[in-house]
């Protein structure tokens, strides 16, 4: 980590000298740019996303262990906006290229690169890669391959939200066919992945959503993905879930990405010994925690952050490989569909950024 920070500082100093600074890669100081790529750069942390600019960025040549990648598609996620705003737990040195998730195709590899070859599809291993660019040069270990027999959208959106859903369904309780999971934010990208992965595991899902004008349409969409029960927060508060628990067992795993009253609804409907896993806080309010749930139901409270999981297992690439293989097989077999995205041409990036900061908007993916 210290070596990476030192080299990053050297690179930034050199690129600032050239007048075209960009962070996120660690190259040798002896290398010199050979051509340019287009990238979306932010030079300060601010809530004003209009400060993001498309710039021409210098590209270095390859060293023996580096790889040159052409970016194909890169989603715009809320976490990307939080990094620009400076509110995310990890921040790239400024100036920085935006984007943490995306799909690239290997164009060129160094002489000592063993695991990648030209033509491979790859996704970043860690956050902070800077995927909102047309090309990138990085280390071999910073990428992992994905199969080319799934769609570009499926591959470009596989490494964050589906991985989050997969880990939460596998890491906190032993779930068997017939088990039940309850979640809020069921229409989010993670929520939709939870529904589909759980259905493939023959696990029943109780899905809580916020009321909205097109609620009936949204319920049908989630049911088409495999949701067993879809209810609004108001319906849960007024009628409870006892009628559902006559048909399926009470859940021992609850997933919370909203917080506030919604998080309390998930928690209060868990079975004895259940676990509430919080992975987001869209309501920006603390979870309502009934004391009796902690005292008399022995409920556990846990948090989950996919970025931290990847960093904790950075040296165990086989585990990441196994998870991606499992998810790609679900995509290949039709059990896991990519989110219903709006594909945005890269030069029209402002549309994607502005849509992402608005509530109840579909996910946008930049197409390079």
Image: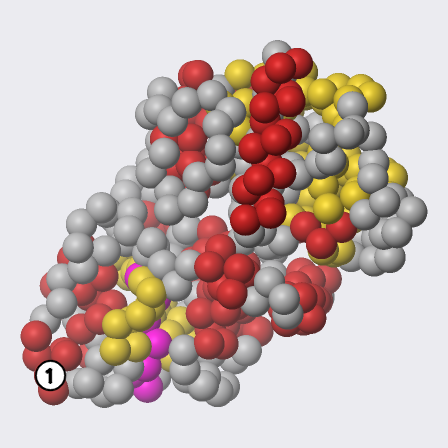
The colouring scheme, among rainbow, by chain, secondary structure or one colour, is: secondary structure
Neighbor class of circle 1 (other Cα within 10 Å; few <14, some 14-19, many 20+) is: few
Does the rendering let one see residue 198? yes
Camera-side residue of 217 and 171: 171
- Vertical comparison of 179 with 209: above or below: below
Instruction: Kindly indicate the quadrant of the structure image that contains residue 91.
Output: top left
What residue span does the magenta drawing correspond to?
A: 249-256
Query: Which residue is pictured at 13% across the width and 67% down the height?
Result: 289
- Viewed as shown, does residue 40 lie left or right of 103? left
Query: Which residue is pictured at 52% across the width and 80% down the height?
Result: 202
- On the image, the x and y values in percent for residue 209 come to 30, 55
Q: Quadrant of the C terminus?
A: top right
Q: Which residue is mark 1?
A: 295
- Viewed as shown, does residue 315 lie left or right of 210? right
- SS type, badge 1: helix
- Viewed as shown, does residue 1 lie left or right of 60? left
Camera-side residue of 177 and 318: 318
Camera-side residue of 335 and 311: 311
Query: Which residue is pictured at 45% across the width and 84% down the height?
Result: 175
């Amino acid at each position: 980590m210290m070596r990476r920070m030192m080299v990053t500082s050297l690179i930034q100093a050199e690129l600032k000298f050239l007048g075209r600074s960009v962070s996120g890669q660690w190259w040798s100081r002896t290398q010199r740019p050979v051509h340019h790529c287009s990238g979306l750069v932010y030079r300060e942390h601010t809530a004003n996303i209009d400060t993001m600019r498309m710039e021409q960025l210098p590209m270095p040549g390859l060293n023996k262990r580096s790889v040159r990648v052409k970016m194909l598609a890169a989603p715009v996620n809320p976490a990307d906006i939080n990094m620009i705003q400076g509110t995310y737990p990890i921040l790239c040195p400024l100036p920085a290229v935006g984007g943490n998730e995306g799909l690239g195709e290997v164009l060129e590899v160094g002489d000592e690169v063993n695991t990648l070859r030209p033509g491979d599809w790859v996704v970043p291993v860690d956050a902070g890669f800077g995927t909102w660019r047309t090309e990138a040069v990085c280390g071999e270990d910073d990428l992992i391959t994905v199969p080319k027999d799934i769609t570009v959208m499926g591959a470009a959106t596989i490494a964050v939200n589906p991985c989050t859903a997969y880990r939460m369904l596998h890491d906190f309780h032993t779930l068997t066919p017939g088990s039940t999971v309850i979640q809020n934010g069921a229409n989010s990208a993670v929520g939709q992945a939870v529904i589909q992965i759980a259905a493939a595991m023959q696990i029943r899902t109780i899905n809580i959503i916020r009321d909205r004008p097109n609620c009936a349409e949204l319920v049908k969409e989630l049911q088409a993905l495999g949701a067993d029960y879809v209810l609004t927060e108001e319906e849960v508060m007024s009628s409870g879930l006892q009628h559902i628990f006559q048909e399926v067992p009470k859940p021992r795993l609850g997933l919370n990405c909203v917080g506030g009253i919604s998080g309390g609804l998930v928690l209060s409907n868990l079975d004895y010994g259940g676990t509430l896993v919080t992975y987001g806080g869209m309501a920006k309010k603390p979870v309502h925690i009934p004391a009796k749930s902690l005292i008399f139901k022995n409920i556990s409270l846990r948090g989950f952050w996919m970025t931290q999981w990847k960093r904790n297992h950075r040296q165990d690439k086989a585990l990441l490989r196994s998870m991606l293989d499992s998810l790609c097989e679900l995509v290949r077999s039709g059990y896991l569909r990519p989110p219903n995205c709006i594909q945005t041409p890269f030069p029209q990036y402002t549309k994607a950024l502005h849509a992402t900061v608005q509530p109840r908007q579909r996910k946008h993916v930049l197409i390079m």
